[in-house]
Every structure is written in structure tokens, then in C-alpha cells.
Amino acid sequence: MEKITIKVPEFSTWAASSDLTPIKLPREGLITEVKIRFACTTAALTKTVTLENYRRTIQNLKIQGDGGHAYLGLSGPQMGRLLALLNEYEYGSAFLTPPVNIAATVAHRSWVFHPGSNPLDPFDMSVVIPAKALATLQVLLTTSANTLVDAAAAIASGYFYYEVNEVLEVNVPAGIMTPQGSTMPWPHDSDHSDFSHNIDVPGGAWLRRIIMMVQDDSAVPDLADDEVAGVKLKLPRTASAQIETFWEELKVESARFNRFPGRPNPVLVTTAEQYPPGLMEMVLPKGFAILDLRKYFHPIWGANLTNFQTGDVKLGLTIENYAAGDDTIIYWDQLAPVDSKYVGK
């Protein structure tokens, strides 16, 4: 067994609000990580720069194999933001360098897709992309607008660079898990009490985590913690207890499970008396929480829904402070055993 990190020779040139040319990924082994870095050049940044918006320069992101099969399916609005928040949760870093200041022109923003269950092991083989058995494997990326980072300092140019971590000299094992996650944007339609808004959970695969990002009705839109008040997983076809929690408790439990270190609250600090340091700590980034099913079911793969139909399991939400434009974006972190036709290759 050999572990390698490969710089992909191809790169993507920035074009605003565009589907960029697909990038071919290496297929020598089993891929355990895909890393993307955006080297961004803008006009001199002004006081209207929004660091949050570096997360959002990627709109859609898909890693696609044979027959259009998606190993990563981040399709819909704000997908770069969702993956960035997940990375910050898993690694405790904003992945933005150097520190971005007014008048700066260059920044680098990175994202990591780690399909395995141990993000601190770059060659974790609990879940892999069976690249060596595939005839094709590509990254498909869609960008956001030129003015996203700073309305007064447009993106002038940029490049997306790619690296992968691979394990070589190993044939595809029978039963090894592969990722097949997908997203579901849900525009809020009204207030809902007592977990009464039901969302159909997809079946036919293992479900490791339900990753949720909640946004308000502002133009940006801003992340919000006052829209979803409660989360309940309803398992009508199993003997398992239902999972029911308040949104704030879910954030605390998410941080506790992953030992997330917390970070300063991004507010304007004018005086020490107004915002003492103890009041500036956030458990998780605003508008973000994870229902991790590994705590309740299989400790690596989560809940086995392979024999369930979509809709057999429901995600119930309590919604408050409704305004048109509020939404919740859900990433279903699903896994499936590798297709038998790839085994042994």
C-alpha cells in the first residue's frame, strides 16, 4: 500500500457565474480526499468586503464518475458556503489566507472533500472514491458573481487548483463504502410548530449525517439561528427511539461530538464593556448544525436505510420568525457499498 498526494495538472480559470470546464481527476488508486484552492485577485478591497463571501465563490460542486454517478453532489444555491462551514467544523480553520484586509488584492480560499469518517486522517479508507476502477472521474464547478466578495472591488481574475490524496496498490475491496451525498434546498413557507414540517429523508443507502445550513431573507443571504427552532428525526419503520432536539442544543451537541473549538463571534466590537470576551464565543458558526447519526447507529456509517424508500423516514422541523426568502439547505451525507462491477479492479 502506498499513500500519495497528487497535484492535478489541469486548473480552472475564473469566469463569473459560469460552469467551468470539467477537470479530470487522477485514477491510479482509491481517492480519500479532493482538495480545491481558489487563488483570487480583486481590485483593492474596501470596507464593504465580506469575508463570509469568500466561502460563496463556488456556487455548485460535483465530483462525477461513470454514467454521471455523483460521488459529491453539491447542487443548488450556496454550496461553497455549505462545504466551507463543514470544513470549519471538521478542521477548526477558516481555510482563508493570508489575512484579508482593506486594500488587499490577493487571497486564497480552500475547500476539502473528505468522504471518510475520520477527517483528521487524509488517507482514511472508511469511505473512498474507487477511482482506479472508473473510466472517467471529473470535478464540475460553477462559480458565483464577480462582485460577491466585495461589491466595490470585483474579482479581476482567479484560478481553481486541485489536489487529491490516493491510496495505491490496493484493489477495490468488496463492500467498501463510497460517498453519494446530495443536497435539498427548502424555501420556508410559513411558521411550523412542534416539528410539524416534514421533509422526506432519502432511502436506499446509509445515512451518516444530516448537515443543515439555515439562511434568512436578506439579500446576501445571512446565516441565521432564529429560523429553525427544533429538529426531529422520525423513524416509523424501526424500533429505534425518535431523535428530537432544539436547534441550539443540536449545535452544542454537534460541537461536543467533534470537539469543535469555537471561534469569536463576528460582531463589531466598539468597547470592551460592550462586548466582553466571554460573550464573543460561538459554539458553531451561525446557521449551521449537524445531526450525526453515528451516535445512534453504526459508529462509522450511521443509519442503514438501504431497505427504506424515500419518505419512510421524516425530518421534522419547527420553524419560527418566518419571512419570505428564508431557507434551509440540507446535505444528505449518504454512503453505499461499492458497485460489484468495480470489485477487485
Image: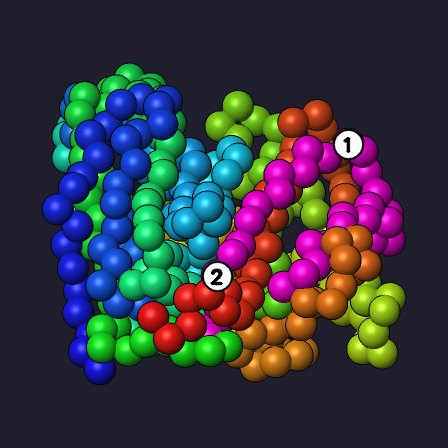
Q: Is residue 214 above or below residue 312?
A: above
Residue 273: x, y in percent? Answer: 44, 51
Q: Is residue 254 visible?
A: no
Instruction: Tell me, yes or no, whether the highlighted magenta stretch contains residue 203.
Output: yes
Residue named by callout 2: 179
Residue named by callout 1: 189
Residue drawn at x 18%, y 39% as measured from the top left: 11
Q: Quadrant of residue 214?
A: top right
Seen as rendered, the residue at the extreme top is 152
Nearest to the observer: residue 340 or residue 337: 340
Nearest to the observer: residue 4 or residue 259: 4
- Amino acid, disc 2: Pro
Nearest to the observer: residue 57 or residue 44: 57
Instruction: Tell me, yes or no, whether the highlighted magenta stretch contains residue 133.
Output: no
Sequence-wise first label, 1 or 2 = 2
Q: Is residue 74 visible?
A: yes
Start-end of magenta stretch: 176-205
Q: Is residue 169 above or below residue 320?
A: below
Nearest to the observer: residue 137 or residue 164: 137
Residue 260 located left or right of residue 19 = right
Residue drawn at x 57%, y 26% as measured from the top left: 218
Label 1 SS: loop
- Marks 1 and 2 close (CB-CB < 8 Å): no
Residue 260 located left or right of residue 293 = left
Give the quarter of the figure containing the C terminus. Answer: bottom left
